[in-house]
Image (tube, rainbow, N blue to C red):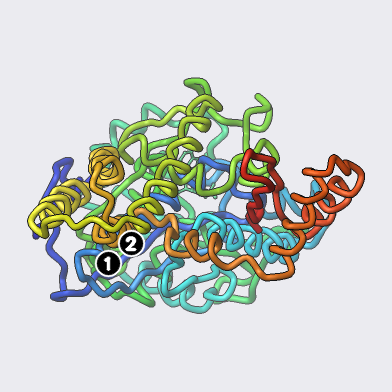
């Protein structure tokens, strides 16, 4: 079945056609590892995961690259301010490389907790300085640059058109030029490719132009080219990448080899909090850990994201998270009810559900519609293993790891079952001290303990 995706380059939904049959080459702009990823960032990676899963569900083999930016991303995306890594190093009194290691590991741990499929290739900027050097040298040789005292700039006026994604025009942009910009820049839209490192700059390399570090935009172009070639299928990122970062990647591709690197450009809209921006200073910036402390496991946040299409803003509220929590329990319990069911259901009905689900996900990843079909299956009064299998099949796209949820339920070790028995007996005999002692023991083993009419219920805490 064909997949339609919205392409920011053409501003239309288009039928997806891969360059090589059956294979998709994909590049996703990854994190800048100077702090923990906040849940807004995580929306971007849940979208990336969703796209991967939909492509895989449709039978494509994937070659997917994601960068880890650990140098060169300045506080403003448009080359102004301090390097984010250096700023974090200064504030935390640590070496910037140690900061990068720490937050890269934290990021990967978050990906695992959310059950996000990791790209085949994770490319760390500081491990690709040589390939960036080669890339920038080619752009220079092709005549698309000029030098100031400390920066090699890309000259955007050399392109037939700059601003293909956001319909910008170089001349128009002169009007927008800001006072704090480098006065030696020829055009407002020109951007830094290669930067001479000041004496106190800790992240620098010996290069053809002295001790330098690369510009953020260059990193993605050079690493994308290294692993995926001059042209590949899809490039993803957040909507904030459209006006600067991705325009500059396209400019670099043109300057390097005359080609726009990707055929399809996909962008995920922002997560908002109470209708506004999420920021540390407003006290409304949350990490996965913050959500956990408030009682929401990472899969609840995954479920919350399916309530909106990726191209629409989504508003984060705790009411919406509560609704997502309830939805996740309904999904799990509904799946188990079908799994335990003994009734039969026509294959034709199964096929119809499958068809509708596929139509929804292949319509530019329409997850709210896909979820409505999942709920139809869950609510089906016929309780049948076939429907449980169908839900597991859908879960390849949903990513809730329902298969393991079943195992968790079934596979409580005997030692735990014994403790539960003991606690139930203690409670029946009103031996509260003993019952509390066992509860604390279970909690220390990483479980949440609940009391119900049926006795003690255990739930393993997310790691
Ligand atoms: P950064 O680590 O700052 O480079 O950002 C990582 C990713 O998160 C980028 O793809 C951004 O577009 C995305 N992003 C940042 N803030 C939000 C937000 N509030 N909602 C969705 N995506 C975001
Ligand atoms: Zn990028």
Badge 1 local density, few (<14 within 10 Å), some, or many (20+)?
some
Which residue does the image show at 71% across and 66% down from the upper left? Answer: 97
Q: Gap between marks 1 and 2, in whole Å? A: 9 Å
Residue 434 x %, y %: 89, 49
For ligand 1, tell me if the residue under mark 2 lies within 8 Å. no
Q: Which image quadrant is residue 72 in? A: bottom right
Give the label, 1 or 2, closer to the camera: 2
Split into 4 quadrants, where in the image is the N terminus? bottom left
For ligand 1, tell me if the residue under mark 1 lies within 8 Å. no
Which residue does the image show at 74% across and 50% down from the upper left? Answer: 424
- 182 relative position to 245: left or right: right
Dot 1: element = helix
- Judging by the rendered image, the residue that carries numbered circle 2 is 396
Of residues 164 and 151, the one drawn nearer to the viewer in this rendering: 164
- Judging by the rendered image, the residue that carries numbered circle 1 is 56
Residue 406 x %, y %: 47, 61
Split into 4 quadrants, where in the image is the C terminus? bottom right
Of residues 283 and 458, the one drawn nearer to the viewer in this rendering: 458
Which residue does the image show at 52% across and 24% down from the upper left? Answer: 319
Residue 68 x %, y %: 54, 63
- 134 relative position to 356: left or right: right
Number of disc labels: 2
Q: Is residue 254 visible?
A: no
Q: Are marks 1 and 2 in contact (CB under 8 Å)?
A: yes
Which residue does the image show at 71% across and 54% down from the upper left? Answer: 447
Instruction: Establish if 151 lies above or below 172.
Output: below
Instruction: Establish if 291 lies above or below 137.
Output: above
Residue 191 x %, y %: 44, 50
Residue extending furthest toward the front: 429
Tell me which label, 1 or 2, sits earlier in the chain: 1
């Amino acid at each position: 079945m064909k997949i339609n995706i919205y392409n920011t380059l053409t501003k239309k939904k288009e039928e997806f056609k891969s360059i090589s049959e059956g294979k998709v080459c994909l590049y996703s702009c990854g994190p800048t590892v100077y702090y923990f990823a906040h849940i807004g960032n995580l929306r971007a990676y849940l979208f990336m995961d969703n796209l991967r899963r939909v492509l895989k569900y449709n039978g494509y083999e994937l070659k997917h690259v994601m960068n880890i930016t650990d140098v060169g991303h300045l506080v403003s995306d448009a080359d102004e301010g301090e390097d984010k890594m250096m700023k974090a190093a200064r504030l935390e009194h640590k070496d910037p490389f140690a900061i990068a290691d720490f937050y890269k590991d934290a990021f990967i741990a978050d990906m695992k907790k959310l059950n996000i499929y990791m790209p085949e290739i994770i490319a760390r900027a500081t491990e690709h300085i040589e390939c960036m050097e080669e890339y920038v040298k080619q752009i220079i040789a092709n005549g698309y640059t000029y030098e100031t005292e400390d920066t090699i700039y890309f000259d955007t006026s050399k392109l037939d058109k700059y601003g293909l994604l956001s319909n910008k025009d170089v001349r128009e942009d002169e009007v927008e030029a800001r006072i704090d910009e480098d006065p030696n820049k020829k055009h407002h839209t020109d951007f830094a490719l290669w930067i001479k490192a000041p004496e106190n700059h800790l992240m620098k390399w010996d290069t053809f132009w002295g001790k330098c570090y690369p510009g953020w935009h260059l990193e993605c172009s050079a690493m994308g080219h290294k692993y995926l070639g001059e042209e590949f299928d899809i490039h993803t990122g957040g909507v904030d990448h459209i006006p600067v970062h991705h325009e500059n990647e396209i400019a670099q591709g043109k300057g390097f080899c005359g080609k726009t690197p990707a055929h399809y450009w996909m962008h995920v809209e922002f997560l908002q909090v109470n209708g506004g921006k999420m920021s540390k200073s407003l006290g409304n910036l949350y990490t996965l850990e913050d959500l956990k402390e408030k009682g929401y496991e990472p899969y609840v946040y995954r479920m919350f994201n399916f309530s909106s299409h990726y191209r629409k803003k989504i508003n984060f509220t705790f009411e919406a998270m509560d609704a997502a929590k309830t939805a996740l329990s309904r999904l799990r319990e509904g799946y188990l009810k079908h799994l335990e069911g003994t009734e039969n259901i026509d294959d034709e009905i199964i096929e119809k559900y499958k068809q509708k689900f596929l139509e929804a996900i292949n319509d530019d990843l329409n997850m709210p519609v896909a979820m409505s079909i999942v709920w139809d299956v869950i609510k089906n009064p016929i309780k049948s293993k076939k429907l449980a299998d169908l839900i597991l099949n859908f879960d390849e796209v949903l990513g809730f790891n329902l298969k393991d949820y079943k195992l968790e339920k079934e596979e409580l070790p005997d030692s735990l079952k014994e403790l539960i028995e003991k606690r139930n007996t203690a409670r029946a005999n009103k031996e509260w001290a003993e019952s509390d002692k066992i509860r604390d023991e279970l909690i220390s083993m990483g479980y949440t303990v609940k009391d119900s009419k049926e006795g003690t219920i255990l739930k393993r805490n997310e790691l």
